[in-house]
Amino acid sequence: MIYRTLGRTGLKVSQLGFGCMRLPMIGEGEGSTVNRDLAFPMLQKALDCGVNYFDTATFYCYTDSQKALGEFFEGEKRKRIILSTKNPHYSENADEWHKNLDTSLERLRTDYIDIYNHHGMGWESYCKFVEPFLSKLMMKAKEEGKVRHICCSFHDTPENLIKIVNTGYPDVITLQYNLLDQRLAEGIALAHSKGIGIVVMGPVGGGRLGAQSDVMEQLAPGVKRVPELAMRFVLSNPGVSIALSGMSTMEQVEENVRVCSDSRTFTTEELRMLDEHTKRLKAMEDLYCSGCGYCKPCSQNVDISHIFQTYNQGRVYGFWDHAKRVYQYITKEGKGADRCIECGLCEPKCPQKIKIPEELKKAAERLGKEG
């Protein structure tokens, strides 16, 4: 395993982090629990291979993720890892914030949390709640030894990432960045220059880059699978310390460990070529549909732009399996292309002059096919 320094924390972290949001489960929905018989061997395999960063949150796995990690890492194993979890509370109710912290400590069976995050902190929540109030609670918890490093996860705009970085408040920021979504690259570089550690969630693009694709597999010589391409791209960014992967099978653990135990990263020239290829693909995607949403609303509740964006995942990037799964969900929600009555009211609204009913038929036919 390759290790990197996590910004100014000074922590030596495995460049592969284990995201514990998608652990294998028993049952579905409320009341389901982590399948310990499957999950614990995965955690042990990762630990044996040198992974030392494990990330969870209050509600992951229907609140059972923290409990499972607490059971597995209790005792001597706890000393070998860096544990990250999150507090989702945003208000001036100190009791609720402390309740979340104490509950996490109890579930994780630990006296302290290494990386404690404001969950999903954006610029608005920072200004309204964190800076004037919650930051004081965080600092107090740090003084008491319950929290080692004050951090946040982030789902806001590139401009607001830069604002948060410039406050100097978080030691580490966990954010989204991948080959198909590089909007936060400038903020990552700025954070790196200021000693703020960066943990990347979604290195495989929410599952898209975890799928097979003849298109994507041709982008980098010597890389045979898309997940490897995705992980190597993220880890080629000098501002990134950890690629955090949500793993649900032993095969995923083994593949990610193999990739992240190899010191090879893309060269400057290879990154330039990848950038050119992805920009070309993005331009093609926008040509089919830019997702502007001007076609809305549809009288039949057809989610036109979402369907086209899903269709583009197949015909532009080659992610047909992923696209079909998403389309099945859209259809179950009653927003599929099958609801289109070809009234034509949407077509004049489209700035790209797409023949929407005609293209919806093509999307439904292709995305509805098996295999």
Image (cartoon, rainbow, N blue to C red):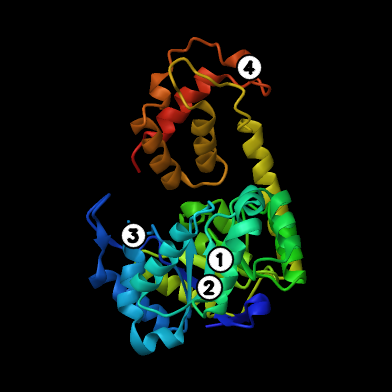
- Please tell me which of labels 1 and 3 falls first in the chain: 3
As drawn, the label of residue 137 is 1
Q: Which residue is mark 3?
A: 63
- Please tell me which of labels 4 and 3 falls first in the chain: 3
Residue name at image x 34 percent, y 59 percent: 61
Q: CA distance from mark 1 to mark 3?
A: 23 Å
- Please tell me which of labels 4 and 1 falls first in the chain: 1
Q: Dot 1, how many residues are within 10 Å of its Cα: few (below 14), some (14-19), or many (20+)?
A: some
| Quadrant in which residue 110 is drawn | bottom left
As drawn, the label of residue 349 is 4
Q: Are marks 2 and 1 in contact (CB under 8 Å)?
A: yes
Q: Which residue is mark 2?
A: 141
Of residues 341 and 73, the one drawn nearer to the viewer in this rendering: 73
Q: Dot 2, how many residues are within 10 Å of its Cα: few (below 14), some (14-19), or many (20+)?
A: some
> Which mark lies nearer to you, 4 or 3?
3
Of helix, strand and loop, which one carries label 2?
Answer: helix
Q: Is residue 178 above or below residue 352?
A: below
